Image (cartoon, rainbow, N blue to C red):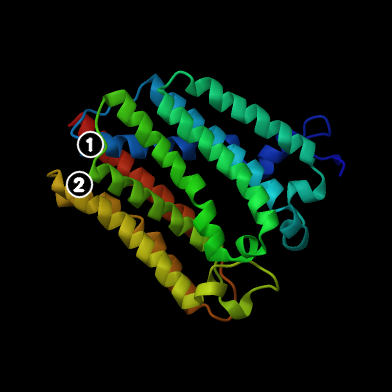
Amino acid sequence: MTTTTSAAGPRWPLLGFLREVYAPGLHLAYAAAWYLALEGTLSGLAGLPWRPDARSLVCIATFFLVLFFLRVVDEWKDLAYDRVHNPDRPLVRGLVTLRDLFRYMALTALAVLAINSLLAPWPLFIVLADLAWGLALVALERRSAALRDGMLLNLLLTYPVNVALSVYAYAAFLARTGAAPSASGMLVMFAFALAFLVYELLRKIAWPALARPGERLYSQVLGGGGAMALVLACALGASFTLFALWLQQGMAPALAALTLLPLLPAGRAAWRFLRERQQRVKLTGLGMQSLLLFYGGLCLLALWRALA
């Protein structure tokens, strides 16, 4: 496969790739929101002051780089599927080549290793294991049709690459503060996993009668109503878990209710989906709104507590 001429120019395929699938500014803001929401929540529930420092910047940079690494892996892993269902993808079109992707992955992994050498060993071990598992999934999906095409089995094995980033941040938090793992910390990990799952499910949901042949959708396995019920269960679980944890810390219910904001776009997505059965509705944007409100509300709570 050769690289075609594009707006980025054949000498700089990375620029075109970033512009199409990984806008740096947007993803850096997303990585910062995710990490700071997690760090601020863990600090507050542990009764510790929240003071982001240089190590926080290392973790944010790690989130940003790992998310890019996994985006590149997905581009490689989904090549056969994208040739049929997403012919406009950069790798399918030839904007980038497989050699380009391998180069990006190698350089990104080296950058992650370099900046995390400044932290304790356990966070570095977790993030490197996450990168390795992301690569292993390529081989596993190629060897197993059940894993490649089974939406729930695929989710079960691929979702840990997302959860591992929160676990990495928790390990870095424990190493920095000297705190011990706690039940509340585990519940925070659980809530963050559910919050992202809302976005993941809404990306791949449509009434089965409207699905394209061979398209991979969670609603084809669970049914339209079942898939949306799972979306709402995840949204409720994520929001009310953190609402309850903050109430246990003595926070005023009106403030703790910021954790419930993600339910608004999730509920709107359910309403649109259940109402529109004759045409497909795109719900990815509402899924992202739910996730960003989840992170944003937690950042506001952490900031309020830090300034109080």
Q: Which residue is at a point 54% across and 68% down the rendered structure image?
A: 218
Q: Which residue is at a point 70% across and 73% down the rendered structure image?
A: 213
Labels 1 and 2 touching (C-beta < 8 A): yes
Mark 1 or mark 2: which comes first in sequence?
A: 1
- Residue 21 rendering spot, x and y as whole percentages: 65, 45
Mark 1–mark 2 distance (CA, rounded to whole Å)? 8 Å
Q: Which residue is at a point 52% across and 64% down the rendered structure image?
A: 152
Q: Is residue 55 left or right of residue 153?
A: left
Amino acid type shown at disc 1: Gly
* Rendered position, 297 above or below 262: above
Q: Which residue is at a point 34% across and 51% down the rendered structure image?
A: 190
Q: Is residue 129 left or right of residue 302?
A: right
- Residue occupying the far left of the picture: 250
Amino acid type shown at disc 2: Trp
Residue assigned mark 2: 246
Residue assigned mark 1: 44
- Residue occupying the far front of the picture: 143
Q: Is residue 274 left or right of residue 252?
A: right
Residue 76 shows in the view: yes
- Residue 296 rendering spot, x and y as whole percentages: 36, 44
- Residue 149 rendering spot, x and y as whole percentages: 64, 65
- Residue 134 rendering spot, x and y as whole percentages: 58, 44
Element at badge 2? Answer: helix
Q: Quadrant of the C terminus?
A: top left
